[in-house]
Image (cartoon, rainbow, N blue to C red):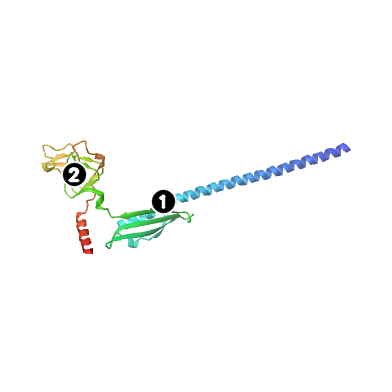
Amino acid sequence: MLNLETSKKSNFREKGAIITLVLVFGVIFLILLSSLFGFILFQLRASVKKAAWNESLHLAEAGIDYYKWCLNNEAEGNCLLDKNYYDPAGNLMGEFSLDIDTTLSCGETIQRNITSSGWTEDFPNTKRKVAVSYGRTSVARFAYLLNDNVWAGPDREVKGFYHSNGGIRMDGENQSLVSSNRETWVCTSSFGCSVGSCPSDCSVEGWNCVCPGVFTTTNNAQTDLFDYPVPSFDFEGITIDLAQIKAAA
């Protein structure tokens, strides 16, 4: 009888120990599981926020492109400085806000400083900024600026931008861009061409030697820096600007 009671007490103790162990390990498992879920949710939110961070930059760049279009189309007065941005499907992605600073000289606008801030719809506090400056092209960027056909001989070394509204025969060495407004031009004897001596890059058409806007007959030039046709340079505009400067003085 005593042995039976002792055996029952022993079984109760073993069952109690097992229940205790189950509870302890169950609690540990729940803690680990909740920590794992918390980590997964944290990583998920971090990745979503990082995507919003990158998207905010694209929205800020979209604001710059938008105002650039306004400038090119002379529509600044009708362009909004705060604007929603939608994807091709018409879903709202976010917004951008523009801050414009204008630089004047002699009463004329010479530069626009544009700062664009972008943010997504889901994370409005995660903002990115892009700042750019748009200004009129300065004549100082050109080493040579011509308004007629020109022949640069093999002894010439050009180290800056070289542009002409006419055709260019570049037999010298160019270290920078050589651009012409002309797609083709008639190279005459004044530029070392004739029907009987038409360079290989050119072609004889009737009694004319027709050449590309920019070409060479030597190995001195870097032909990968030839660019034609490009928009013409407005020499008449320079004359008008000089007259305005004189009047303002």
Q: In which quarter of the image is residue 14?
A: top right
Residue annotated with mark 2:
168
Q: Can residue 76 be seen in this view?
A: yes
Which amino acid lies under the numbered mark 1 shown in the image of this protein? His
Q: Where is residue 173 in the image (x, y as percent from the top left)?
A: 22, 39
Q: Which residue lies furthest to the front in this view?
A: 249
Q: Name the residue under label 1.
A: 58
Q: Which residue is drawn at 21% across and 62% down?
A: 246
The vertical placement of 234 against 4, above or below, is: below
Specify few, some or many for label 2: CA neighbours under 10 Å numbering under 14, 14-19, or 20 or more: many
Badge nearest the viewer, 2 or 1: 2
Q: From mark 2 to mark 1, how far is it between C-alphas?
A: 41 Å
**Residue drawn at the location 62% of the way across and 45% of the way down:** 33
Q: Where is residue 103 in the image (x, y as percent from the top left)?
A: 32, 59
Establish if 168 lies above or below 132.
above
Residue 92 appears in view: no
Which quadrant of the figure contains the C terminus?
bottom left
Q: Is 22 situated left or right of 174 in this image?
A: right
Callout 2 secondary element: strand
Query: Percent x, y for residue 224?
Result: 26, 40
Give the image quarter of residue 193: top left
Of 132 and 71, which appears nearest the observer?
A: 132
| Count of numbered circles in the view | 2
